[in-house]
Amino acid sequence: MMEVPHGRGYVYSIQYHIVWCVKYRHKILYSKIEKRLMEILNMVATYECFQVLVCNTDKDHVHLLINCSPQHYIPNIVQKMKGMSSRILMREFGETLKKTLWGGHLWNPSYFVATVSENTEEQIRRYIQNQKRK
């Protein structure tokens, strides 16, 4: 059983399933770009004090299962992950990405988020891990 974190005067277990897409659903998340994206998302999570439990891509979108505290605001988490990853990936892989993505935008501005319960966490983990095996 997972250890339930606590703060001063409260105990919590908060997980979210987050998904967002590449602009125009272009299939660019492969090999070096995908690997670097995973590193960046984990770096942002460490800096912002939340956990990426599972992360996977399927060439044109990203799936994450995160664990965070009640102080985290989901729109800020998503904004930081998308913003940092876009800036770094465009700087490091700009030549490759700009051939496909014009206008300098890597991510679609929208995203999906759902809360995860203890009953559905394992299902969501398997779903995310099996993204490339459709």
Image (cartoon, rainbow, N blue to C red):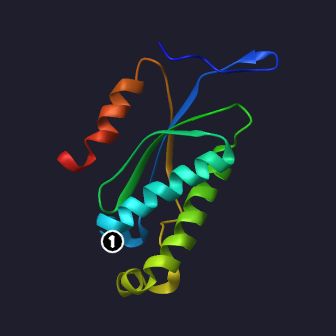
Question: Callout 1 environment at 10 Å: few (<14), some (14 to 19), or many (20+)?
Answer: some
Q: Quadrant of residue 12?
A: top right
Q: Residue at x 29, y 65 (%)?
A: 31
Question: In the shown orientation, is residue 50 left or right of residue 109?
Answer: right
Q: Amino acid at mark 1?
A: His
Residue 105 seen anywhere in this rendered image of the structure: no
Q: Position of residue 84 (x, y in %)?
A: 59, 64
Q: Residue furthest right?
A: 8
Which residue reaches farthest left? 134
Pick whichever, 114 or 57, lies toward us.
Answer: 57
Would you place residue 19 above or below residue 59 in this image? above
Q: Which residue is mark 1?
A: 26
- Horizontal relation, residue 50 to residue 58: left or right: right
Q: Position of residue 70 (x, y in %)?
A: 71, 31
Between 29 and 38, the one lying in front of the other is 38
Decide: is 29 above or below 116: below
Which picture quadrant has residue 61? bottom left
Residue at the spot x=55%, y=61% of the render? 82
| Left or right of residue 63: residue 45 | right
Instruction: Report if residue 27 is visible in the image.
Output: yes
Say which residue appears at 40% left-offset and 54% top-offset: 62
Residue found at x 18% / y 46%? 133
44 versus 93 height, above or below: above
Residue 40 rendering spot, x and y as whole percentages: 52, 58
Asked which secondary structure carries label 1, the reply is loop
Nearer to us in this view, 92 or 72? 92
Q: Position of residue 9 (x, y in %)?
A: 81, 15
Q: How many marks?
A: 1
Q: In the picture shown, does residue 17 fall above or below 96? A: above
